């Protein structure tokens, strides 16, 4: 008997998973861009383990990010961040969401370049502000004018985030839509092999 079942096209998730192969996928971008939330959902779509580097740092140090900044300062936090990311990149594949400053640190950025493919979740100031001002766990934003601080960080950091392999616009749109755009970016970048913007 002939099989009359029509062929089923592989889903976007399956195509992205195949395109990624053994590589790690690393989310970078400013505070509030959605790295932690979108990273977790992307990992689930890809059927891969997810690690948020801030959560991992908090787990190994048994301190919150705010406590680490207060007790040891940003310099020590960056050292810890670099070590944690280096260790995570040694194995895989997995999805890794970094804290906003990780990719700015040259040592960490080089590690990410070697151990994975990077995706910048890019967002406008108003989108970022709307999201970060709801919570107060980000030590760098404990300033007199946190929105201005965020804007200053945008001008300093955006040229560096732009070095990422892929860029996806994070905006006032359902998270599922952003995740689909991330999956499409992976397919495009991994099959064509040039920067995706
Ligand atoms: N597309 C989106 N739409 C609405 N809220 C979002 C979206 N993406 C992220 N968020 C929310 O914005 C907040 C900040 O996101 P988070 O993932 O913590 O950002 P990051 O890790 O980049 O700092 C969270 O409350 C998250 O659920
Ligand atoms: O931008 C930064 O330098 C930081 C971003 C934070 O992570 P999110 O980007 O996930 O908020 C966290 O790592 C720390 O507060 C420092
Ligand atoms: Mg985060």
Image (tube, grey):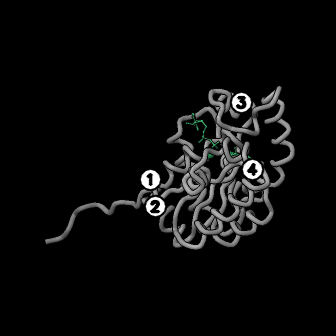
* Quadrant observed for ligand 2 in the rendered image: top right
**Residue 104 x/y as whole percent:** 79, 55
The residue beneath circle 3 is 129
- Determine crowd level at label 4: few under 14, some 14-19, many 20+ residues with C-alpha closer than 10 A: few
The residue beneath circle 4 is 72
The residue beneath circle 1 is 44
Please, what secondary structure does the residue beneath circle 4 have?
Answer: helix
Is there CB contact under 8 Å for labels 4 and 1? no
Q: Label 3, label 2: how many angstroms apart (C-alpha)?
A: 30 Å
**39 sits left or right of 154 in the view:** left
Is there CB contact under 8 Å for labels 4 and 3? no
Q: Label 1, label 3: how many angstroms apart (C-alpha)?
A: 27 Å
**Residue 164 x/y as whole percent:** 73, 59
Please, what secondary structure does the residue beneath circle 3 have?
Answer: helix
Q: Label 4, label 2: how many angstroms apart (C-alpha)?
A: 33 Å
Give the label on residue 48, or none.
Answer: 2
């Amino acid at each position: 008997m002939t099989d009359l079942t029509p062929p089923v096209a592989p889903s976007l998730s399956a195509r992205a998973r195949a395109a990624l192969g053994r590589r790690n996928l690393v989310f970078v971008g400013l505070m509030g861009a959605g790295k932690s939330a979108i990273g977790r959902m992307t990992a689930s779509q890809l059927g891969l383990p997810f690690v948020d580097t801030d959560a991992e740092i908090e787990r190994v140090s048994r301190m919150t990010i705010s406590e680490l900044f207060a007790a040891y300062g940003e310099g020590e936090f960056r050292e810890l961040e670099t070590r944690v990311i280096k260790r995570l990149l040694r194995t895989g594949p997995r999805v890794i969401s970094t804290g906003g400053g990780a990719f700015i640190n040259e040592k960490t950025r080089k590690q990410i370049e070697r151990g994975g493919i990077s995706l910048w979740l890019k967002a406008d100031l108003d989108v970022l502000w709307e999201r970060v001002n709801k919570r107060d766990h980000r030590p760098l934003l404990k300033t007199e004018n946190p929105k201005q601080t965020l804007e200053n960080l945008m001008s300093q950091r955006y040229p560096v985030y732009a070095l990422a392999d892929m860029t996806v616009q994070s905006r006032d749109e359902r998270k599922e839509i952003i995740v689909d755009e991330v999956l499409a970016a992976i397919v495009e970048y991994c099959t064509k092999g040039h920067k995706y913007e």
